Amino acid sequence: MADGQPQISLTFPDGSARHYPAGITPAEVAADIAPSLAKRAISAQVNGAHWDLQWPIPGDAAITLNTMKDDAPALELIRHDLAHVMARAVQELWPDVKVTIGPVIEHGWYYDFDRAEPFTPEDLGRIEAKMREIIAARDPVLTELWDRERAIRHYEQTGEPYKVELVQAIPEGQPIRMYWHGPWQDLCRGPHLQHTGQLPADAFKLMAVAGAYWRGDSNRPMLQRIYGVGFRTRDDLKAHLTMLEEAAKRDHRKLGREMALFHFQEEAPGMVFWHPDGWTIYRALEDYMRRRLTAAGYREIRTPQVVDRKLWEASGHWDKYRENMFITEIDEEHANEKRVNALKPMNCPCHVQIFNQGIKSYRDLPMRLAEFGSCHRYEAHGALHGLMRVRGFTQDDAHIFCTEDQIEDETARFIDLLSTVYRDTGFAKFDIKLSTRPEVRVGSDAVWDKAEAALEKAILKVRNDYEVDPGEGAFYGPKLDFKLTDAIGREWQCGTFQSASSAS
Amino acid sequence: MAVRHLPERFIGILIENYAGRLPMWLAPRQVVVASIVSEADGFVAEAVAALRAAGLRADADTRNEKINYKVREHSLAKVPVILAIGQREVAERTVSMRRLGEQGQEVLALEEAVARLAAEVLPPDLA
């Protein structure tokens, strides 16, 4: 170490600190600790940020060196490096193919390619084989920062118009990072593994090809998206594939047909035709919910489905949500007046009308209202999925009007009610997520402090653990989301509890 | 404060969680009473009436088909309990009870079967 070179202090997870020259890389730090660690390391966390082993560390920092034993970084890198290795394999097999983007997604990754010929299932097999060759070659991964002009010139020369567009879209002043997996180059934020040999050659699979517009814009070229899944071990991959098979067997759309429970048809997309056996299930569940709600002190109400736009204007839906509402026009008074109505997309504004009529004094609070209300929302055709995502649905919707002091207690009572419902329906495990104040919001910080604290305390009355999703609350209040885990380990977003103390 | 729960979606999740084999209280058809021989039809009707009177969702299957065929069909439809009635059952006023996904069967008096099943189909909040 040269004298006069600025020194930085790196703090390790065990609390110990070491001094190094500024600009040292995590790879060098690992080598300084132990050669075996240098080999096993895959990346680092530097002040919490996921850091490539090759990136210099500019100043004092807390550092953790990651190995394949660290779940989250390991899976992120495996999937991300596999995306690059797949794109390299595709271009080695078909040099004319243009590359675009390839992000990590749940369980794997995808990469979008521009190629005239469609990828066939046989092609996927060839790509997988080529990927294994690249992994076996243990090609080093390298990275450099380039300036914008050089990057654009490079992609113009190599005939990659999509990459030119991506470079141009990077805001001025932001670094442009290039990565190489062996000889193959890609524009990428990183981080990545040390070399392709760190990838498990037997723990990935290419799953499917689908069409996708460049930048999701139907006026731009249609690309081919190849999906892959990647894990740390062959056993993890096998478990995932078994889960998918099991999920296909359990698909409620298939069972709904086989058991004659319900059907859908083109004349009413996303609206359920319930058959006698399906409706029997629905009724059994509704009767049960009604009894539980009644026992918990809720009063059932019923409000209109077709409501004048004036109410939706007042509630803000007309402005913010009109594209998702089914709108009806009717001639009133022998066509002297054209009246515009909308089918309610939620029960909320209607419940407020009842509350406004009924409240006599604060002694009437808390007032708990419930409705099995029929709601309609326009969802894009492609987003519809059996009973899981529909256009016409019921909201088993409850509103609790209460004083600020009652929020905590009412929330705890609700969590208790929902816990009972989940237990009764066979879901032993569910998680609670608290979404806190977003950047754009109404109400003072003091009101938010109080609202968030009330929900937190309410959860803690019922159980010890919950997740926090910072900034994901609605603009008018924090919320709780309930996530169920099913028999094959899948998670399902289920009930929602929305607090609105700052607005109503 | 608002609370939202979507029954349609929840039913979709329930069907997938249970792979269609819903718990008794949610099963659309809880019991099918199937005849083994046509001479049993009268007792099948009596059994169905007794089950319905006890609050069960029960149906008769007196089609002129082999019992194995009936059992297979109702198992595919995920009916949790099948009561088979042949000549011996008629004579002894018993039923042969088969449960979905289980091997073997249990022979018991009709009244006892009704009482036992009536307790099993109670929703969890009433059980």
Image (cartoon, rainbow, N blue to C red):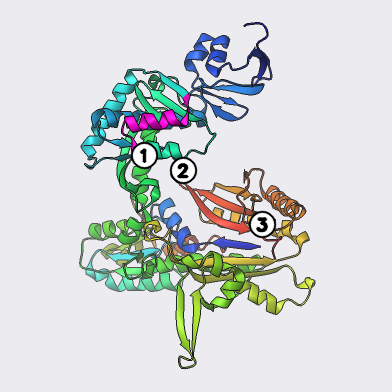
Q: Can you identify the residue that label 1 sits on? A: A162
Question: Which labelled disc corresponds to residue A489?
Answer: 2
Query: Residue under mark 3: which chain is it in?
Result: A
Is A148 magenta? The answer is yes
Q: Can you identify the residue that label 3 sits on? A: A477
Q: Is residue A465 above or below residue A4?
A: below
Residue displayed at 59% across by 17% down: A23
Image coordinates for residue A152, horizontal then vertical, percent: 40, 33
Counting residues from the N terminus, which is met first, the one under dot 3 or under dot 2? Answer: 3
Q: Is residue A217 above or below residue A159?
A: below
Tell me the quadrant of the picture where the N terminus of chain A can be found: top right
C-alpha span from label 3 to label 2: 31 Å
Q: Main secondary structure of the magenta part?
A: helix
Amino acid beneath label 3: Gly
Mark 1 or 2: in front is: 1
C-alpha span from label 1 to label 2: 39 Å
Q: Magenta span covers which residues?
A: A145-161
Q: Is residue A116 left or right of residue A137?
A: left
Residue displayed at 62% across by 56% down: A474
